[in-house]
Image (cartoon, grey):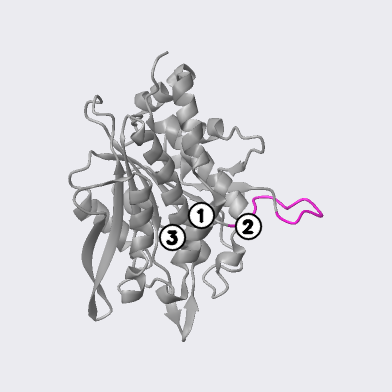
Amino acid sequence: MVFGLSVLAGMILLAGSMSAQEKHSVSDAQNLISKQSLKKTIEALTDPALRGRESGTEDIKRGLGVITDAFYDGGVSMKGDSYLYGFWYWKGNERALGINVIGIIPADPSVVSPKTLVLGAHYDGLGVLGGRVYPGADNNASGVAALTEVGKALGRLASEGIYPSCNICLVAFDAKLQDCLGSSRFLSEQAGNLAPVSLMINLDQIGTTLAPPKEAETGGLLPKDYLLFLGMDNVEDTVKKAFVEANDSETPIVLDFTCYGNKQVHDMLYEMGDQTSFRDAGIPAIVLTSGVHKYTNKISDNAGIINFNALTERCKLIFRAIYKLAYRQQQD
């Protein structure tokens, strides 16, 4: 199954016909994505009270309000009567409750038989190991913060009556560290009344500039901004084209579609995320990441290592690319 090539091609070809009013609305929506809001979300998810957000604990449940409030305030609709969808699983010898957080930007009502694009990020973390808390700022509070920021921009468009040509489902997955149970249960138990999922974009560890695809320039305080794409061989060329064409800011992001040109590293990293649940179900799925670095899965993975300027620009790029992929532009 592939994300409808004819639909995507039509989206991109029609991009030039966007009205002046719609251009203004898209610009205003993008400008809602802010460094301050990203920082607030990541700091909330790494609060010591959440003790590293281990799945199946009371600690992780304290972070649910951070995500649901962001969805609600951002104009992201509920899938049904709630954003929260639970599932039971066995954690060792104990029964544990996992909770996915699901929001929807519905398709334009005029679209017949719309598909669904899923934008996801896992929010669980390592928790407490050996008496030490693992905050999980980059892995993966950064992905969740990006998810809610992009959702806020999409929600603004919906509030102005600008709807996509497919449903956009925003999911914060639980239990990624339990064999990606949150994403697999989403597909098997929680996606029932959604239109068929045709593309999944996963945001996983997206907040640093510590593992660039090429060396930083000598003397620079931070590497040049970049974004790594894994799994691009699984999707139509129109997906890559949307990101390339959306990369139109004054300071374009370096887009690496080869994972440092190392297939072995690419394949290893791709197999470590929620995108594999979708891939295994026959759904094209990619992951966007800023890479593994020396703080990954360490107690030092705190908000201090996040490059909020880079994360902000990445979120804006993702929003622009999703707009190119999923919205039917209006003829002038």
CB under 8 Å between discs 2 and 1: no
Q: Which mark is residue 211?
A: 2
Viewer-closest of 255 and 321: 321
Magenta region includes residue 212: yes
- Judging by the rendered image, the residue that carries numbered circle 3 is 272
- State the residue at coordinates (44%, 65%): 45
Farthest residue in the top direction? 332
Q: Which mark is residue 38?
A: 1
Figure check: 15 above or below 129: above
Q: Closer to the N terminus: mark 2 or mark 3?
A: 2
CB under 8 Å between discs 2 and 3: no
Secondary structure of the residue carrying numbered label 1: helix
Magenta part of the chain: 208-222
Q: Closer to the N terminus: mark 2 or mark 1?
A: 1
Mark pair 2, 3: CA separation: 17 Å
Secondary structure of the residue carrying numbered label 3: loop
